[in-house]
Amino acid sequence: MTFHPRSVPYRFAGRLGLVSVFSTVLLLGSCGKSAPPAPSPVPVTVVHLVNRPITVAEEYPAQLEASNTVEIRPRVGGVLERAAAVEGQRVKSGEVLFVIDPQPYRAALAQAQATLAQAEAAQAQAKRDLARAQPLSKLDALSQRELDAAVAADAATAAQVRAAQAAVRTAELNLGYTEVHAPIDGVMSRAQIRIGGLVTAYTTLLTTVYQTDPMYVNFSIGELRLLQLQRELGRPPDQRNPSRRAFHVLLADGEEIQTPARLDFIDAAVDLKTDTLAVRLAIANSRQLLRAGQYVKVSVETAAPSDALLIPQRAVQELQDKNFVWVVGGDGKAQQRDVTMGPRVGADWIVEKGLAAGDTVIVDGVQKLKPGTPVDTAQQPAVAKRPS
């Protein structure tokens, strides 16, 4: 192996040269690197808050009930001979609904009338016997015992006449009961017994008649809500003076019944099982659109603030039982704001604390936001739907 002393300095010089070149390149690269660009504004949709008058209402599930429901049962038994009324149609009070075979009751009436005639004939004979016995008794031509027998016979035949008259009246009633009449005006339900069926007095259900005008609307209100209503009204609700609170009845499809409803009944005690109070409304049903058993909703007006602030419900974020919203600050950047929310009104939410009129609340586009993020509010502002 041959050693060259001059080769070592040359090697070190070469390495130093490479290090110098790399340092120069890095220095030039660092000097040419610019500052990071500012983040672009996040496009958002906003709503500008203004005070507006609204009406706050709460909805309760309810069920309709006929104002009067009568089960039609026969007062006499027999074979159903005829159905005089049409199922599902309106009937008038006193109208014939069903006819039970009257032949057995006609025969019973004829027998009772014959028995009455016999009793009346016996009474007439007893009166004649008494009329003859009384003068003879005064002449001592007739014993006292015979006179007493004539008096007793007259009284007994009179009693027999009265009994026969009662039997005739009963037979007449039974014959009349073979025609079953509607006790009220209303709508006849489905017949439970068909022609030829055997019915039993006071037992067999023939049909049901519903008085559907007016209709009752039954619902329950919580005890706490009742206390709130009492505080708002300054007194317990009173069906005799319902003008201070409006009730709206809504069908299953959301359509409101235009006929006004009035408060008709408030239960005297709270149901201990459900902790609710039964309330009933009365509503006219002249067009017969409402049916017994139908489910509806009752909207009760609870407050009417004149300067409420509303924001869409989707603008409110929830975190650990707290609510907050994103607002646009004066510098055009997003900020979080803690808020206290009140009742919901349709798709909107009433703001009780945390916001004021003139604030700009971000509704859509909050997924990419963090405090201090610049936002672009050039999109069409969201407008909260005004409650009707």
Image: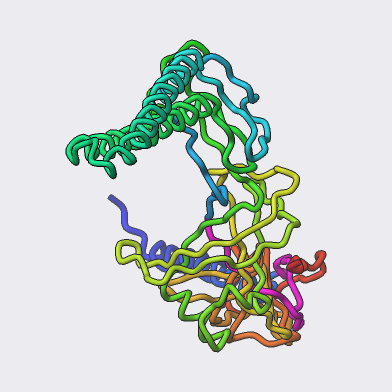
Let me know if residue 210 is in the magenta part: no
Looking at the image, which is closer to me, 330 or 152? 152
Looking at the image, which is closer to me, 87 or 148? 148
Residue 5, how many percent across, how many down? 36, 65
Looking at the image, which is closer to me, 31 or 37? 37
Q: Residue at x 68, y 75 (%)?
A: 310
Q: Residue at x 37, y 36 (%)?
A: 131
Residue 7, how many percent across, how many down? 41, 62
Q: Quadrant of residue 128?
A: top left
- The answer, for residue 331, to whether it is visible in the render is yes
Q: Specify the farthest residue to the top.
A: 196
Q: Residue at x 81, y 65 (%)?
A: 379
Let me know if residue 60 is in the magenta part: yes
The C terminus, quarter of image: bottom right
Looking at the image, which is closer to me, 324 or 378? 324
- In the image, residue 69 above or below residue 8: above
- In the image, residue 284 above or below residue 344: above
Chain part drawn in magenta: 40-61
